[in-house]
Image (spheres, helix red, strand yellow):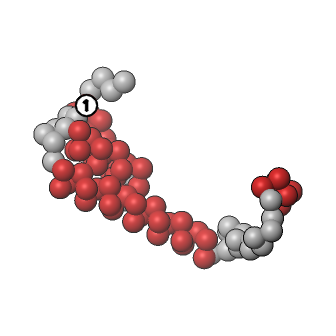
């Protein structure tokens, strides 16, 4: 439960300005719902879109750097219980 929506809005704005995707998303939700501010659907959509793009680019960057193992190819004949043996 948020006790001080204006403070939350201010703190999320600072974090969002640094490009932190979860803060961008949560700030977008606050603008969408009008919590701590007037509802602004245009700003909400922009913030949520930016959060998604930021998170996606971070994921792609991490995957291309080699820190995430390459995706395994599965044949169509594999059953769900057979796939559990392939888990890392």
x then y, percent, for residue 28: 28, 48
- Asked if residue 17 can be seen in this view, the reply is no
One can see residue 30 in this view: yes
Report x, y in % for residue 15.
35, 49
The quarter of the displayed image where residue 7 is located: top left
Disc 1 secondary structure class: helix
Residue shown at 23%/44% (left/top)?
A: 32
Residue lying farthest to the left in this orientation: 38
Closer to the camera, 42 or 18?
42
Residue at left 25%, top 59%? 46
> Is 30 displayed left or right of 61 in the figure?
left
Q: Is residue 14 above or below residue 55?
A: above
Residue linked to disc 1: 5
Q: Is residue 83 above or below residue 8?
A: below
Above-or-below relation of 69 to 81: below
In this rendering, would 48 be left or right of 42?
right
User: Residue 64 in the image: x percent, y percent?
Assistant: 60, 76
Image position, residue 71 (x, y; %): 70, 71
């Amino acid at each position: 439960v948020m006790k001080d929506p204006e403070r939350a809005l201010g703190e999320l704005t600072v974090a969002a300005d640094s490009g932190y995707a979860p803060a961008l998303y949560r700030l977008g939700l606050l603008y969408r719902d009008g919590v701590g501010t007037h509802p602004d659907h245009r700003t909400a959509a922009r913030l949520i879109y930016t959060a998604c793009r930021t998170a996606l680019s971070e994921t792609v960057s991490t995957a291309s750097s080699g820190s995430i193992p390459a995706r395994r190819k599965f044949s169509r004949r594999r059953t769900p219980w057979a796939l559990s043996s392939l888990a890392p």
